């Protein structure tokens, strides 16, 4: 199997230009195949063995027919500049739209229970999905909302889906826009770092949920930009939470540093009760 890398393409180009390469720089079954097929030849340089391509055209044809490499120079540029590698260009240059690994689906999901004005690529839009549907922001680098909109990150899918049944929790926040933590691709954090809006993390009230907030958001946004949502009644709800969840999480997160001191009362209560409480408990039933 030929592993297509920047280094390999640079070496193949040098072979087409008539250079001799040390055998130590070309290894693998594909090299043996090319030697057997006469595409490469061995040359002795003193005590060292080198490989050459006596017919550059034959090498180019072989790479195209055997390995779907239609253009060495274009393939090299695509590997060096992955952002420019569209699937169409990849197919034309290499015969393989997956030749360069890059994400074709960027962005994140947003939801709301009231109209949220926004701008996408300079055009005004309104975020207010129909019940049972979400809005997916693909071109997130061109997505903005007014500065007074509060961004609320929702950790669990069920809470994100039924956010209208939890609107009673967020009356203190002006025009909340809810964003999903999934898919976990880093785009949400990059967007948050690029906008001035305040971020509120709504997750499980357990050690793992707090760790997610501290490690994925708080350490990058800081106390002036981020906070963990703590409902007024969470200290009354914790005793009815899950002891098993706490015991499973304790070995990994029990000694984690609580870098946001505002969370110390909640963490102390979790340790005192030996329990954690799932955020789904705040979804109102019909």
Image (cartoon, rainbow, N blue to C red):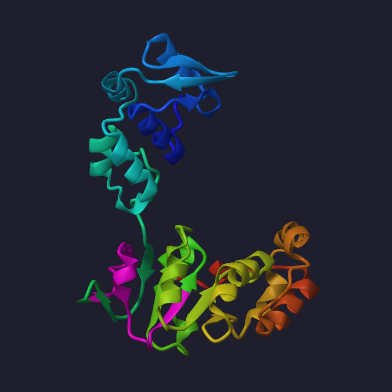
Looking at the rendering, which quadrant does residue 275 occupy? bottom right
Magenta residues, as a range? 125-152
Image x and y of residue 235, in percent: 68, 81
Location of residue 40 with respect to 111 vertically, above or below = above
Query: Is 166 placed left or right of 62 in the picture?
Result: right
Looking at the rendering, which quadrant does residue 206 occupy? bottom right
Of 259 and 207, nearer the camera is 259
Image x and y of residue 128, in percent: 29, 74
Q: Which image quarter holds the C terminus?
A: bottom left
Name the residue furthest left: 123
Residue depicted at x 53% and y 77%:
221
Q: Is residue 45 magenta?
A: no
Image x and y of residue 158, in percent: 47, 63
What number of labels is visible? 0
Name the residue furthest front: 46
Of 225 and 59, nearer the camera is 59
Query: Is 273 placed left or right of 215 in the picture?
Result: right
Residue 175 appears in the picture as rendered: yes
Image x and y of residue 9, in percent: 39, 35
Query: Is 32 placed left or right of 249 in the picture?
Result: left
Residue depicted at x 30% and y 18%:
55
Q: Is residue 139 magenta?
A: yes
Location of residue 184 with respect to 271 vertically, above or below = above
Of 53 and 92, nearer the camera is 53
Residue 97 appears in the picture as rendered: no
């Amino acid at each position: 199997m030929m592993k297509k890398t920047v280094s390999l393409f640079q070496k193949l180009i040098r072979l087409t230009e008539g250079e001799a390469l040390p055998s130590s720089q070309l290894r693998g079954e594909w090299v043996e195949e090319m030697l057997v097929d006469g595409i490469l030849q061995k040359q002795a340089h003193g005590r060292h063995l080198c490989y050459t391509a006596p017919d550059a055209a034959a090498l180019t044809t072989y790479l195209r027919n055997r390995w779907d490499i239609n253009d060495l120079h274009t393939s090299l540029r695509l590997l060096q500049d992955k952002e420019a590698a569209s699937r169409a260009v990849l197919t034309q240059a290499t015969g393989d739209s997956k030749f360069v690994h890059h994400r074709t689906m960027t962005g994140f999901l947003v939801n709301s229970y009231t109209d949220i004005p926004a701008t996408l690529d300079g055009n005004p839009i309104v975020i207010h999905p129909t019940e049972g549907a979400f809005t997916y922001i693909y071109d997130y680098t061109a997505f903005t909302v007014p500065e007074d909109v509060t961004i609320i990150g929702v950790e669990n899918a069920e809470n994100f889906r039924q956010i209208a049944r939890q609107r009673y929790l967020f009356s203190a926040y002006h025009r909340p826009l809810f964003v999903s933590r999934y898919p976990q691709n880093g785009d949400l954090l990059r967007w948050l770092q690029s906008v001035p809006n305040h971020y509120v993390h709504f997750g499980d009230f357990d050690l793992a949920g707090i760790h997610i907030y501290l490690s994925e958001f708080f350490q990058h946004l800081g106390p002036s930009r981020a906070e963990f949502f703590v409902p007024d009644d969470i200290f009354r709800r914790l005793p009815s939470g899950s002891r098993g969840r706490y015991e499973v999480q304790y070995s990994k997160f029990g000694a984690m540093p609580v870098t946001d001191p505002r969370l110390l009362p909640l963490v102390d209560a979790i340790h005192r009760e030996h329990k954690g409480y799932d955020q789904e408990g705040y979804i109102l039933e019909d």
